[in-house]
Amino acid sequence: MSKFACFIFVAGLASAMTTPAGAAQRSYNGTWPVTIVKSQFFNGTGCLTLEGSGRSGSATLTLNGQTYQQGSFLIMDGIFIASIVKPSGSQNGVLQFTAHGGGGRIGSGVFENLEGGAEFDAGSLAVGMKNGC
C-alpha cells in the first residue's frame, strides 16, 4: 500500500470514528402511529408527526379525530419526550409522551395529560413503525 493510499485509509477511518454510526438513518422526521391504553380519557390510536433536524423539532398529534398542532420533541440519553399543547379552558394543558428512543426508533412508554401543572390522566403508550400512518 502506498503512503498516499495509507493516508486516505487512515483519514477515512478517523472520519468514520467521529461520525455516529448510521447518522443518516437516525432522522425522526415522519409519522409515527401511537396507541394509548389504560387512560381514562385518551384511549385510542392516532398519529404523531415529527419534523426537525436530528434529535429535536416540532410535533403534531392527531388522536381520536382531534388534531393538536403546537408541540415539540426531544431525544436525549435514550429517552424520547414529546409535549403537545392542548387547549384547556382558561389555561393550556399538555399531552406528554415519554418513551425509550434512540437509533431512529421510538419504543413503548407512558402518556400523560397534564392540566394546571399536575397529572390529570395517564396511560400506557405504544409507538408503531416510522411512517406507519
Image (spheres, rainbow, N blue to C red):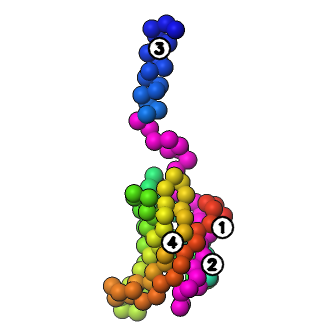
| First in sequence: mark 3 vs mark 1 | 3
Question: Of 32 and 88, which appears nearest the observer?
Answer: 32
From the image, tell me which residue sits under label 3.
Answer: 6
Q: Quadrant of residue 65?
A: bottom right
Contact, mark 4 vs mark 2 (Cβ under 8 Å): no
Residue type, numbered disc 1:
Cys
Q: Residue at x 49, y 64 (%)?
A: 100
Percent position of residue 115, x then y: 39, 87
Q: Residue furthest left?
A: 117
Q: Residue at x 53, y 43 (%)?
A: 22
The residues colored magenta run 18-43
Percent position of residue 84, x then y: 45, 75
Residue type, numbered disc 2:
Thr
Residue 48 shows which numbered tag?
none
| First in sequence: mark 1 vs mark 4 | 4
Give neighbour class at mark 4: few <14, some 14-19, many 20+ (Cα, 10 Å).
some
Question: Of 98 and 117, which appears nearest the observer?
Answer: 98
From the image, tell me which residue sits under label 2.
Answer: 45
Contact, mark 1 vs mark 4 (Cβ under 8 Å): no
Residue 117 visible, this orientation? yes
Residue type, numbered disc 4:
Gly
| First in sequence: mark 4 vs mark 2 | 2
Percent position of residue 77, x then y: 39, 57
Give neighbour class at mark 3: few <14, some 14-19, many 20+ (Cα, 10 Å).
few
